[in-house]
Amino acid sequence: MNQLLPLSLLLVASFAACGGAQPTNTPAAPTTPASPAVTKFVLAADPGEALGVVDAKLAGPADKVIVEGRIANVVKGFAVFTLMDKALPYCGETNKEDKCSTPWDYCCEDPKTRTANSMVVEFHDAAGQPIATPSLPSLQLVDAVKVTGKLTKDADGNFVLTATGVFRTEHPTLPDYVKLPN
């Protein structure tokens, strides 16, 4: 069985919990740079027209696809994250009174809604395994990105986008009380 499946399941399972951290000051970027093995995936230019996460899942597996969404969760120590459909607002994006200190976890949404609007993105090394890295290259939670790659669906119906490139399209300004994890 594929060894990356446990990482994907860990990422999906982590969506079940809702962040409860107390509000803090200014959001901080990760201080540890991404490994060179991951930074090579950063695209210098917008890759073009993209499907949203939901539309990409409806279209099904594809050898070449561009999918757009927001970074919603990152597997610590690996270039693996959840991509959330941009049509689903992150917590506090539209309701400014929400005061959510962890908007990237979409805890304001039902778990079924989160699952329907998300897919796992993985950056692989030459051996086909997720790349170990201390951080993502110039990317943060809630950033809007376009990811190029191959979309697959496993026997359990989970979609995984094996990335060949990533381009950040938006870096939203978050409220002062939101502190991004390192």
Image (cartoon, grey):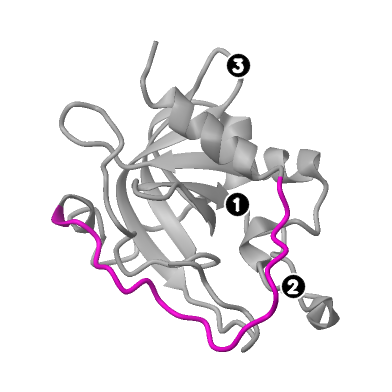
- Measure the alpha-carbon separation of dots 2 and 3: 32 Å
Tell me which residue sits at (61%, 20%) in the image.
Answer: 157
Sort mark 2 into few (<14), some (14-19) or many (20+) by Cα contacts within 10 Å: many
| Horizontal relation, residue 22 to residue 4: left or right | right
In front of the other: 77 or 143: 77
Image quadrant in which you'd find residue 33: bottom left
Q: Is residue 106 magenta?
A: no
Mark 1 → mark 2, Cα distance in angstroms: 17 Å
Quadrant the C terminus occupies = bottom left
Q: What's the magenta region?
A: 17-36
The image quarter in which residue 152 lies: top left
Seen from the viewer's position, the closer of residues 114 and 150 is 114
Task: Please name the predominant secondary structure of the magenta segment in the image.
Answer: loop
Between 144 and 59, the one lying in front of the other is: 144
Q: CA distance from mark 1 to mark 3?
A: 19 Å
Q: Which residue is mark 1?
A: 84
Q: Disc 2 designates what residue?
A: 100
- Camera-near label (2 vs 3) is 2
